[in-house]
Amino acid sequence: MLSGPGRPASVCPMLLPQNTQGTLYDGFITAGGKEYRLRIQLPPSRELNRARIDCDWRLQLVLQDKQDIFKQRLEQSSDLTTFLVELQNLLEQTSSQQSSMGLPPQYFTQLVQEIDKLGWDRLVYIDPSFRSLQVQCRDACQREHILTINLHNQYPQMTPTCTADLPAKVNFKWSQQDSLQGVLLQFEKALAQYQDFWDIMEELDKSTWVLEPEKPSYKDTVRRIALGNNASVQITVDPAHPRMLPECRFLGADHVINPIKQSLNANLHCWDPGQTLLPNLQNVLGVDFPSPANSSKEDFNMACSICYAYRLGEEIPDKACDDPRCSRPFHATCLIEWLRALPSTRMSFNVIFGECPYCSKVG
């Protein structure tokens, strides 16, 4: 196929046709003094909006936040040559924007080299300023974790800031000779410390009805577990010692939770550190937690009897009438507002006393 005016080769001499029909091109596009690998496959009709375009990771990186513009140029171009001109212009504009960030060229060169060492398949996201990236890592149980790395303008002279969904803060060590790969190795080492903790928390999440948090993350050490009868227990687990007795806070009507508290105090000596939390808690509390196998979560998502909603912002009902014949649940916020409006309400030592909005029992 000959090149000439209007031909792709007139714009990208290194983007070569791979068949006589002119529907497949493979090679490089040059923009901003850099070469990017590009492969374009057109349908027999040569409609650009149905073209398949593959490129290297460097080009994907540059165009990451320009996807909408890229698609728009592709759809609006009358032919492949016009699109290549538009793509070159877009790349040159993006390169100019990167230069105006005040970051030296060696910053981008080193960053690309370090991502090469990490593996591009691990890169989940990089922001348009090239100062923040997210890298994925899998632990021994194939759970996926995301490490967010924020780079300073003086990188690698200045230590990057790293954050992740971990139950405790990790102090990443850094020197000017270190690399992102070294940071990832430290992250993997930190993940290894919490395998037992995550296994234990996953067992609770799968075998009980967790009321809070609504969507537990890897950093969450607290679970509020349904007990039934509008009662629940909130446990706080030590991630460094996940098999030890957690801190327990019982929520619900006194006639429901007091016997469970008594059982806990009487059975503390039965706690077995060799067991996980689920069997230990059921043993010392003397209860069988309702589970997804034999109940529905709606059975425990009881709406507040004042506002008639289950979730009020981040709050769910955690108070209940102490009368066994009533046991209506309430948001603490709703109940306090209700009681403060009643002339019969009294307060002593920061504890408010008043009548149940439903049964009028004083508590």
Image (spheres, helix red, strand yellow):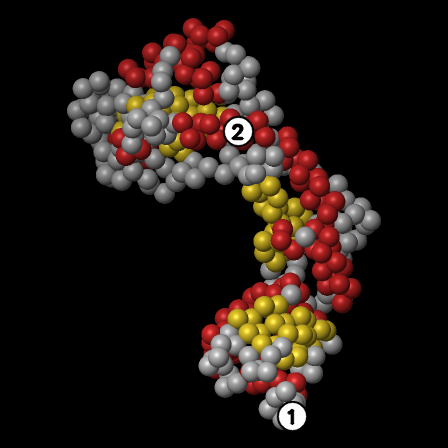
x, y percentage for residue 166?
Answer: 58, 37
Residue 192 seen in the figure: yes
Residue at x 50%, y 11% (from the top left corner)? 271
For this orientation, the residue located farthest to the bottom is 5
Tag 1: amino acid: Gly
Residue at x 27%, y 40% (from the top left corner)? 309
Residue at x 33%, y 28% (from the top left corner)? 293
* The quadrant where residue 152 appears: bottom right
User: Is 288 located above or below residue 87 in the figure?
Assistant: above
User: Is 239 located above or below residue 15 in the figure?
Assistant: above
For this orientation, the residue located farthest to the front is 20
Residue 351 seen in the figure: no
Q: Is residue 361 left or right of residue 59?
A: left
Q: Is residue 28 left or right of residue 238?
A: right
Label 2 element class: helix
Label 1 element class: loop
- For the C terminus, the quadrant is top left
* The quadrant where residue 18 appears: bottom right
Of the residues tagged 2 and 1, which is closer to the observer? 1
* The quadrant where residue 92 appears: bottom right
Tag 2: amino acid: Asp
| Circle 2 residue | 199
Callouts 2 and 1 close, C-beta under 8 Å: no
Front residue of 321/35: it is: 35
Q: Which mark is residue 4?
A: 1
- For the N terminus, the quadrant is bottom right
x, y percentage for residue 95?
Answer: 67, 73
CA gap, disc 2 and disc 1: 64 Å
Local packing at callout 1 (Cα closer than 10 Å; few below 14, some 14-19, many 20+) is: few
x, y percentage for residue 127?
Answer: 60, 60
